[in-house]
Amino acid sequence: DAGVIQSPRHEVTEMGQEVTLRCKPISGHDYLFWYRQTMMRGLELLIYFNNNVPIDDSGMPEDRFSAKMPNASFSTLKIQPSEPRDSAVYFCASSLGQGPWNTEAFFGQGTRLTVV
Amino acid sequence: GENVEQHPSTLSVQEGDSAVIKCTYSDSASNYFPWYKQELGKGPQLIIDIRSNVGEKKDQRIAVTLNKTAKHFSLHITETQPEDSAVYFCAASRGHSTLTFGKGTMLLVSP
């Protein structure tokens, strides 16, 4: 397996524009996570899915952020409208499970978003 | 919710020295403690983890210790090499909860 695949790797957009980040999890993994990484706040969990169903979106900062997982092999994180403070590296991760003893989360390479 | 504090934020060592990174957690029910390594331009990658029924775990040059009473755990890297230079994150979780990460430690190993 090629691992978790994210696209694009880099995105530069103007304030007010819509941004869509994409993620393909590892085949067979039933958990998918979206994280945001900044120098100030570190790695923050935005939302996670189990079997394509959103379980906890309490980390989504505002209504401008939305995430979907239409099937087991694809997820999107959308920001509309984007703002300069959204500039960060966004990671997608997937794992086999999240039982009483957590299993390893595999991260993608990330999407570096710059909003100017 | 869980809160994970990580220290130091930066650490510089000479090649061959040991490096120690420490984390504390707040939720006494946390039972899983992984460590991730993030190289420049890449996503974090699991390097070692420890569960609450174990006090220490070792894998070649890296080891992790857990003190449940004090609610802290540490990463130890011996005989450091330049390729160990990266950002290291500790994390904690319990039961079916998600991981809470520390802020990270930038480790620089000088030849």
Image (tube, grey):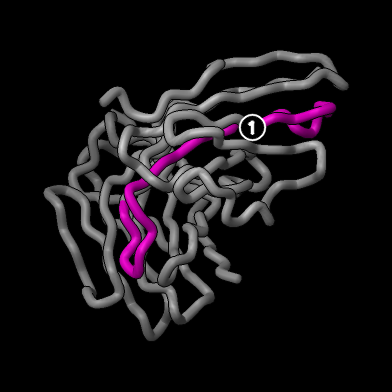
Q: Residue at x 35, y 42 (%)?
A: A29
Return the residue nearer the eye: B67 or A59.
A59
On the image, the x and y values in percent for residue A62 come to: 80, 45
Q: Chain of mark 1?
A: A
Element under disc 1 = strand
Q: Residue at x 59, y 39 (%)?
A: A37
Quadrant of the drawing holding the N terminus of chain A: top left
Quadrant of the drawing holding the C terminus of chain A: top right
On the image, the x and y values in percent for residue B57 come to: 18, 63
Label 1 Cα crowd, 10 Å radius (few <14 / some 14-19 / many 20+): some
Q: Residue at x 41, y 45 (%)?
A: B88
Which residue is disc 1 drawn over?
A77
**Residue A13: in magenta span:** no
B35 up-or-down from B3: above or below: above
Q: Residue at x 39, y 46 (%)?
A: A30
Return the residue nearer the eye: A85 or B106.
A85
Left or right: A85, with B47 as reference point: right
Q: Which residues are magenta?
A: A78-103
- Residue positioned most to the bottom: B69
The amino acid marked with disc number 1 is Leu
Return the residue nearer the eye: B86 or B33.
B33
Q: Quadrant of residue A87?
A: top right
On the image, the x and y values in percent for residue A28 come to: 31, 39
| Residue B40 seen by the camera | no
Q: Quadrant of residue A84?
A: top right
| Residue A102 seen by the camera | yes
A115 up-or-down from A65: above or below: above
**Residue A93: in magenta span:** yes
Q: Quadrant of residue A70?
A: top right
